[in-house]
Image (spheres, grey):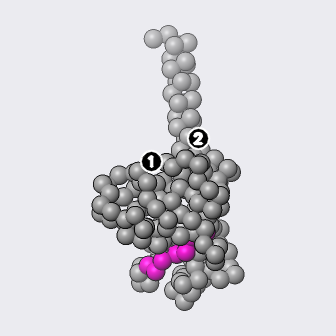
Amino acid sequence: MTKRTSLAAFVAAVVIQALILIAVPARRVFTRATGKTVVLKVQPVDPYNVLSGYYATLGFDISRVDAFPNAQVFPDGPIYAVVARGDDGTWKPALLESHLPDNLPDNRVAILGQIRGGMITYGIEEFYIPEAQREKIAEDLSKHQDKARVEVKVDRGGHAALERLRIEDRIYE
């Protein structure tokens, strides 16, 4: 192999690695920039295991298949959870679809999830907690869990990105 060929192979390897590093967070950046804001009520989680390292584990009413009116036995795999904006500003389970629905009204959004054993995950179940706010957020979640909400951005393809956690009038980003 000549010097020129070796250099070209090295540059190609570096470019490919750089593209991979850029592509991984690109979906979330795109979703945050172009997505529609959806507010979800946080469901109770185990108060003794709210924090796992520097992450709070969050649950939602849209995480259970049986929370949707058209609940049935869906096979494990991808699913679109259609949520509808409620009168209180939070988004509620409306229906489940096996494919991305077309032409949803403005008060409905489809979120792509994965079903496993009757539960649906969306990739928004963990909230990173800065070390300086760790104790405050843990205490806030345990005392005011019924008032906890998350703001999520959802793009046209149904991909969700967690924006912030709200507990009463306090916002954690």
Residue at 50 percent across and 20 percent down: it is 9
The single residue placed furthest to the bottom in the displayed view is 143
Give the amino acid type for the residue marked by disc 2 in the picture.
Ile
Nearest the viewer among 89 and 11 is 89
Determine whether the residue tagged by mark 1 lies in a helix, strand or loop: loop
Instruction: Let me know if residue 79 appears in the view.
Output: yes
Query: 10 Å neighbourhood of mark 2: few (<14), some, or many (≥20)?
Result: few
* Residue 132, quarter of picture: bottom right
Residue 154 in sight from this viewpoint = no
Q: Quadrant of the N terminus?
A: top left
Q: Is residue 109 left or right of residue 93?
A: right
Left of 145 or right of it: where is 36? right
Q: Quadrant of residue 14?
A: top right
141 or 62, nearer to the observer: 62
The part of the chain drawn in magenta is 39-45
User: Residue shown at 67%/75% (left/top)?
Assistant: 171
Which residue lies at the image location 51% right of the left edge and 86% below the top edge? 142
**Image location (x, y in percent) of residue 163:** 63, 63
Circle 1 residue: 99
79 up-or-down from 14: above or below: below
As measured in the structure, the alpha-carbon distance from the residue carrying label 1 to the one carrying label 2 is 28 Å
Q: Which mark is residue 22?
A: 2
Residue 126 versus residue 119: which sits nearer the camera? 119
Above or below for 153 versus 30: below
Judge whether 101 appears above or below 44 on screen. Answer: above
Confirm whether the magenta stretch covers residue 42: yes
Residue 173: image x %, image y %?
Answer: 65, 68
Name the quadrant containing residue 48: bottom left
